[in-house]
Amino acid sequence: MKICYFYRMENILETTTPKKTNEIMTPIKILLVDDEPDILEFLKYNLLQEDYQVFTAENGLEAIKIAEIENPHLIILDVMMPEVDGVETCHRLRAIPELKNTIITFLSARGEEYSQIAGLEAGADDYIQKPIRPRLLISRVKALLRRLENGSNSDNFSNSLQVGILTIDKERFEVFKSGEKVDLAKKEFDILWLLAQKPGKVYGREEIYRKVWGSDVIVGNRTIDVHISKLREKVGAEIIKTIKGIGYKISITPGS
């Protein structure tokens, strides 16, 4: 039996009063996925106070169907669900081309490092741990959605880059290595695009956090490591270099 890790429903009233329609785009669609009706009610109530359009699903299969129809801007996923768990649901959502720009975050009571790593490797943008107070939850949601307004990187000069054997097309969200397509999760793509802006430049962890996740988003200590590790597996460890104690860079050498 799953324990409810949220504060009691009367604490919902401490949330702020309804705001004006969100300025990023109208309406902002959020899909909540959890097999506990009380938790769905809690989340939906608080998000409706911010004028978001909210959809709910009680399992992964239902979530995928709704996401394909509604194309939400943000999906908040629980990990522990019957039939198809949150990690597998995230994998399947990321395989849908129309959802490539959808922000996905886990909201789970599971705080083990391996659970967080599994979620990030599945393509999630963030991993939020329960319990969380309503005001903090709304703050985290707004920080994630702010990326839709600002973009993950304000320094973009072109929609396409050629870096060694890599061709990166930001408009189509595609990467090719020596002519062969490489499938990347959104955050992996965002990091690669950032590094590719200035090949050879070492980007520190704080700069990557700021430009890819945004200064208002708080992510776990292993978040960048996990995404860089997956990115190196896909495009090549010889291309994505780790500079110990400093950060990461794209290295272009003859034949790469």
Image (cartoon, grey):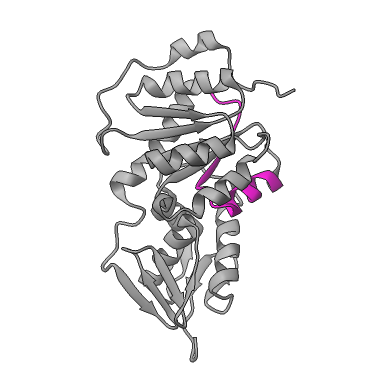
Question: Which percent across, then down, holds residue 50?
Answer: 35, 24
Q: Please state the extent of the stretch shown in magenta in the rendering.
A: 114-133
Q: Residue furthest top?
A: 10
Residue 217 screen position, x and y as percent: 45, 42
In this rendering, is residue 194 above or below 126? below
Q: Residue at x 57, y 39 (%)?
A: 61
Q: Is residue 9 left or right of residue 165?
A: right
Residue 110 occupies quadrant? top right
Determine which quarter of the picture holds residue 68: top left
Vertical placement of 7 versus 100: above or below?
A: above
Q: In the picture, residue 176 is in which quadrant?
A: bottom left
Q: What count of labels does the image hold? A: 0
| Residue 189 among those drawn in magenta | no
Residue 100 vs 171, above or below: the answer is above
At which x and y percent is residue 96? 46, 53
Using the rendered image of the protein, determine whether residue 73 is visible from the camera's viewpoint: no
Residue 226: where, in percent of width, then height? 60, 57
| Camera-side residue of 140 and 89 | 89
Residue at 65 percent across and 40 percent down: it is 85
